[in-house]
Amino acid sequence: MKNTFQGFKELVYPKFCIICSKKDYSICEICLKPWSDKPKISNIGDNYLYYVSEYNLDTSRVILLAKENGNTTAIDVISSALVESIKLLINNQRVEVPLNIVTIPSTSSAIRKRGRDHISELCENVIKKLKNISITATSAPLLRVSKRVKDQSRLNRNQRLDNLENAYSLQGLVPSGGEFILFDDLVTTGSSILEGLRALSDAKITAIGAVTACATGRNSLIR
């Protein structure tokens, strides 16, 4: 009965790749390939950045579909990439204790506009996937936006750094055990991660690295 209903559903609502519109795929093999690469290590400030996909036109479309549209296929693709980034961090830094995932915060206006907190939802999805492979992680939303900031989308690197200078502050209780990592879906100039590192450092919290699904991959942009 379930298979019959699923077949009827696909007949009425056929699947198409979210990127190239190829029929019978939620996302086809070709469009999925950039998200299936081995995770990579770069540097951001004095910390490591772990990521899977290079930022380009096609990968940016997946990011936007997840962030702005709440597309479940895109969210799953990004979540899986983040899991791979976290696995590389654990192996590279020989982490044996639970992880506290500190998300880069969204502004209140962005959350209102989307009707959801994209990064927090993404983090919870990643935590569930990690649990399935016996990696213990908890959400530690310690950062909040504490000053008025502009939309970053049309700002260059220096403007983004100025825009986010001292923009984050701590909130809530700091977990007493485990390692801390910073978490975002996308890193381009690195301004958000650098500000997150600054805010944690000022509170005497050391992040052992940052993870993302997608990044420019060019160290010159994210130092």
Image (spheres, rainbow, N blue to C red):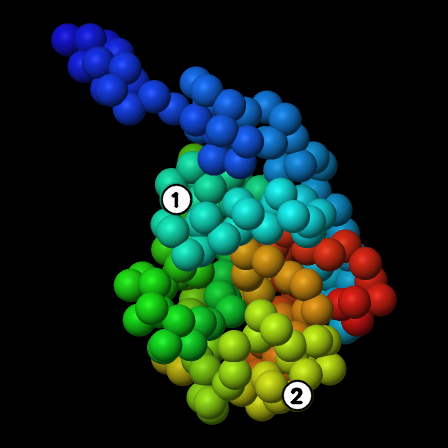
**The residue tagged with tag 2: helix, strand or loop?**
helix
Percent from the top left, x then y, of residue 95? Answer: 64, 52
Q: Is residue 93 above or below residue 10?
A: below
Please indicate, yes or no, whether residue 201 appears anywhere in the rendered image: no
Q: Residues within 10 Å of mark 2 (few under 14, many from 20)?
A: few
Question: Residue visible at 27% across and 15% down?
Answer: 11
**Which quadrant of the figure contains the C terminus?**
bottom right
Q: Is residue 49 above or below residue 96?
A: below
Q: Is residue 95 above or below residue 152?
A: above
Q: Is there CB contact under 8 Å for labels 1 and 2?
A: no
Q: Nearer the viewer, residue 126 or 15?
A: 15
The disc labelled 1 sits on which kind of residue?
Asn
Percent from the top left, x then y, of residue 12? Answer: 24, 20
Question: Residue visible at 41% across and 56% down?
Answer: 68
Q: Nearer the viewer, residue 95 or 223?
A: 223
Q: Return the mark for residue 162.
A: 2
**Which quadrant of the figure contains the N terminus?**
top left
For residue 191, which quarter of the picture? bottom right
Percent from the top left, x then y, of residue 106? Answer: 44, 71
Please indicate, yes or no, whether residue 31 appears anywhere in the rendered image: yes
Whichever of labels 1 and 2 marks the residue nearer the N terminus, that label is 1
What's the CA distance linking mark 1 and mark 2? 32 Å
Question: Residue visible at 77% across and 54% down?
Answer: 217
Q: Return the mark for residue 71.
A: 1
The disc labelled 2 sits on which kind of residue?
Asp
**The residue tagged with tag 1: helix, strand or loop?**
loop
Q: Does residue 111 appear to the left or right of 168 in the view shown?
A: left
Percent from the top left, x then y, of residue 76? Answer: 45, 40
